[in-house]
Amino acid sequence: MTGGEAPVTVSCAPAAGSNFSVGTTPVTCTARDAKQQTAACSFSVSVTRAPRLAATRFVAFGDSITEGFAHTCQGTPTLSRADFLRDVYGFRPPDNSPISYPNKLRTLLAARYSTQTFTVINEGNGGEFITAGAADLPRVLAQDAPEVLLLQEGTNDMDGIFFGDDPEVQMTTVVTKLREMIRYARSRGVLVFVGTLTPQRVGACRGYAPAYIGPVNDRIRFMVSGEDARLVDLYGAFGGVAGADLIGPDGLHPSEAGYQKIADTFFDAVRQRLEN
């Protein structure tokens, strides 16, 4: 208001200091001068609810890609099965590997859902084959009591093809055991997110089965579509390519950026499914 005479008083409805409900509330304010001249304006106040997840306790279950390996090649590629097994079991990341995707996922959850406290337990077991993982899952679920299971396993089984294992048998085993784990977890009321296998690089010291990762992932996608679980397409998130930016020098384990990509992809799937 211009040309008014002091004093000028302002009143608003709802009044200043009022509590506003979630949603959009119109507010009108009126200025009145000593001559009782008035002028008014209106605006809206929008209040949004802080995002929340319907679950806060997670278990990430799998092999070294869950545990958080970052490994470089040592000399020439290993060629014997005995050397392969020795190599698989011989390198361990630090306890609670800081670059692991479960740790990075925990950071993402805490940043977005600041009013909640999250538990993300890393049950990755480097060198684990999927039959052993399926046998160990009941113990892990009973011990950790998660609401959500993040499952990504089968890489070591696929690597066996390099050493003469039948590709059809290996792919069938991976899909069958993943299905068993999904069904067991669901029988306990645990929500399941299943990650596809990450790509491998041809010619690297641990790029044992790059040609079979795409085909087995096709089978995993089809299987998960018929189960009460959510697919998390890590292979697709990597573009189906084991580029040096996301896959480390051994051609198998992700780089730190690759682990971040895995965490981001699981996070997006969890958010879509569980945010309210």
Image (cartoon, grey):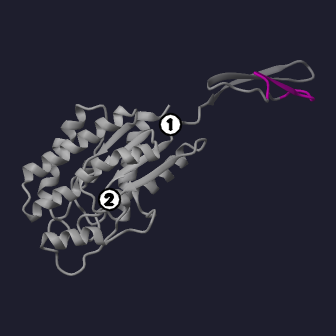
Region of the chain picked out in magenta, as a range: 3-16
The verdict on residue 10 being magenta is: yes
Q: Is residue 97 left or right of residue 229?
A: right
Where residue 101 sits, quadrant-wise, is: bottom left
Crowding at mark 1 (Cα within 10 Å: few <14, some 14-19, many 20+) = some
Q: Position of residue 164 (x, y in %)?
A: 6, 62
Residue that extends furthest to the bottom in the rendered view of this protein:
75
Crowding at mark 2 (Cα within 10 Å: few <14, some 14-19, many 20+) = many
Image depth: mark 1 or mark 2 in front:
2
Residue that extends furthest to the top in the rendered view of this protein:
36
Relative vertical location of residue 207 with respect to residue 123 in this rendering, above or below: below
State the residue at coordinates (53%, 46%).
118
Q: Which mark is residue 179?
A: none
Residue, disc 1:
53
Q: Position of residue 246 (x, y in %)?
A: 31, 61
Relative vertical location of residue 153 with respect to residue 6 in this rendering, above or below: below
Observer-nearest of 157 and 24: 157
Residue 190 visible in this rendered orientation of the protein: yes
Please name the amino acid that badge 1 sits on.
Answer: Leu
Please name the amino acid that badge 2 sits on.
Answer: Ile
Residue, disc 2:
65
